[in-house]
Amino acid sequence: MSLPYDDRDGWIWLDGEFVPWREAKVHVLTHALHYASSVFEGARMYNGNIFALEEHCARLRRSAEILDFEVPYSKDQLMAACNETAAKNGLEDCYLRPVAWRGPEAMGVAAQDTKIHTAVAAWAWPSYFAPEQRMKGIRLTRAKYARPAPFTAPTESKAAGLYMICTVSKHLAEKAGYADALMLDWRGYVAEATGANIFFVRDGAIHTPTPDCFLNGITRQTVIKLAKRKGVEVIERHIQPEELSTFNQCFLTGTAAELTPVSEIAEHVFKPGNLTFDLMEEYSQLCRGELALA
Ligand code: PMP
């Protein structure tokens, strides 16, 4: 068990100031706690440089706009806050969690009178999936819940509320001995894992679901560019679950998950292969500034 997240040493950037880690608190009548009026980001710093920081800060602001609130800091101010938070905590390789939410100034569904709060925390978080599992590929089961349709939820926002179905699905997967779960979308197409996008390989080409009802991850977009740069064909399309048996390789992408090979989805077996390992390596080099994308 890791240390609880409220009982650590260090500093958290909260509404423009650094507060001691254990004092970065909210009230129980915070609107976000009751109505999920919260959006967040996950970014990673490698060797003192936060990968795709601008994209993450822009997405935080956009996620909030979709939930009808404005983050009271500009993209540049958020970027500075992220860099300062890592520096203040003496971190050069870490995960960063910017978050913005509605405060306790109003209760009820209408929330126009609430103040918007913003925080950034940073901590060392080496691998989202256990390192020994990661190289041979993680095992996925089917998720209990499907991704909601874009007309039923703000699916383009990295909104806290959209994660309740992910948490329940991931718990069920872990209880059954799996690392994660494959979520379908409301139409029954393959969508993503509970906190990462999904890719498949067949005949040297990459197939990945069209992100029309789930997050078009920053890692996903980066990996597509890396694959195209290698001359690999990338086909974004609707993928039927019946097609899973026709793919040879499968991997997940996400800021926390980075590139993680998948060895099983329920009864379907994949063998992590060269294309997956090459992209893993190139993604790692790119994040560390050892490779440049045109
Ligand atoms: N889908 C979900 C549900 C996620 O939580 C994440 C992680 N933010 C992703 C996809 C991947 O997004 P990114 O590559 O931008 O981290």
Image (tube, helix red, strand yellow):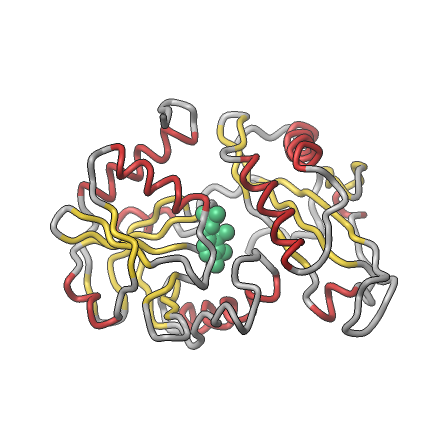
As displayed, is residue 54 above or below residue 97?
above
Q: Residue furthest front?
A: 151
- Quadrant for the C terminus, please: top left
Q: Residue at x 57, y 64 (%)?
A: 154
Q: Residue at x 24, y 36 (%)?
A: 278
Q: Quadrant of residue 186?
A: bottom left
Q: Residue furthest left?
A: 203
As displayed, is residue 161 above or below residue 11?
below
Taking 88 as reference, is 19 left or right? right
Q: Is residue 256 among what the camera can see? A: no
As displayed, is residue 32 above or below residue 46?
below
Q: Residue at x 53, y 58 (%)?
A: 156
Q: Quadrant of residue 238?
A: bottom left
As displayed, is residue 40 above or below residue 91?
below
- Quadrant for the N terminus, please: bottom right
Q: Quadrant of residue 144?
A: bottom left
Q: Is residue 247 among what the camera can see? A: yes
* Residue 121 percent location from the top left of the image: 66, 43
* Residue 9 percent location from the top left of the image: 71, 40
* Residue 69 percent location from the top left of the image: 73, 55
Taking 248 as reference, is 191 left or right? right
